[in-house]
Amino acid sequence: MSPTPEIAAAWLAIIAYAASSVGFTIGAIFGKRRAEEVAVIIAVIGLAAHAAAITLRWVRIGHGPFLGFYEVASLLAFMAVACFLGIIARHRDVRIAGVAVMPVAFLVMGASFLVSKDSMAVEGSLASYWLAIHVAFANLAFGAYAASFALAVAYLMKHGKPNRRWQSLLDRFPEPDTLDALTYRFVGAGFVFQTVMIVSGSIWANEAWGRYWGWDPVETWSLIAWAIYAIYLHLTMTLGWRGKRAAWVAVLALPVILFSLLGVPIVYQSIHGAYLRL
């Protein structure tokens, strides 16, 4: 049986993200600017194919990518790549950070293909505008956090003590202060988006289950991730943390937010599991 246009477009996105990851890695290791340029083009092609896959599925099933692990993971990968390409459209000199973003997008998108792609109907407690708002801001938050992760990785690479072999590559990065400031801005944006995500999710939970907060594993880990980014902002705004210490917090926070969005439904029995089923 030949694949549907939706699945074919999704496979093209996965292949493009993998190829883009290879291109950025070659550019980082061997200092090949041409490889980075090609990797960016491939990432754009992958994002276009990914957008087509999401749109085709949306039209076919009649609702957005809100339900099930496949849809949620796919949209998170899409937002990560979209935010990264948005950054380098304005700051071309940070495109090497694709060596951090594109493998994450590839792995998340690839993981979505390991589970069922069956659609879920939007009915009952799911038929709420708050669900769409909740999911939309969850993806905006992850996209911003993924961007901050990439920028923090670039900062750590730039601020390290490389041997001469890497110096020519790192000379092409923006100044550390620029990377530090951009990381802070994207964490701040992600934090605002995540706050709206949690609040809208609480309102939806009250509509669906009759309570705003129940310390469900998904809710608890979302709060943990929110608290880690709140700590980052507190350390930078109040205690004046800058540089390597702040960058490490931004780097280490991304796995936590990723786990809260995708890992918790796999590890824990959760009331959310019915809506994030594998």
Image: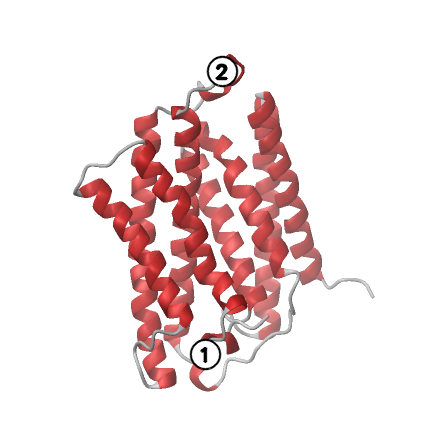
Q: Residue at x 42, y 55 (%)?
A: 257
Asked if one can make out residue 133 in the rendered structure from this viewpoint, the answer is no
Q: Quadrant of residue 138?
A: bottom left
Q: What label sits on residue 271 in the rendered view? A: 1
Q: Residue furthest right?
A: 1
The image position of residue 100, as x and y in percent, is 51, 39
Quarter of the image with the C terminus is bottom right
Task: Work out whether 187 lies above or below 7.
Answer: above
Label 1, label 2: how far apart the Cα atoms are: 51 Å
Residue 199: where, in percent of width, then height? 29, 68
Q: How many marks?
A: 2
Give SS at disc 1. helix
Give 53 or 228, whichever is nearer the viewer: 228
Q: Is residue 231 above or below residue 170?
A: below
Give the amino acid type for the residue marked by disc 2 in the picture. Asn
Residue 226 or residue 126, whichever sits in front: 226
Q: How would you rate the neighbour count of disc 2 (Cα within 10 Å): few for under 14, some for 14-19, many for 20 or more?
A: few
> Image point 55% across, 42% down: which residue?
102
Tell me if 49 is positioned left or right of 257 in this view: right
**Rendered image quadrant of residue 38:** top right
> Could one spot residue 114 in this view of the protein?
yes
- Is 92 situated above or below 59? above
Question: Which labelled disc corresponds to residue 240?
Answer: none
Q: Nearer the viewer, residue 161 or 127?
A: 161
Colour scheme of the picture:
secondary structure
Earlier sequence position, callout 1 versus callout 2? 2
Q: Is residue 269 above or below residue 164?
A: below
**x and y percentages locating residue 9 in the rendered image:** 67, 55
- What SS does tag 2 mark? loop
Q: Label 1 is placed on what type of residue?
A: Ile
Residue on which the image places disc 2: 163
Q: Quadrant of the N terminus?
A: bottom right
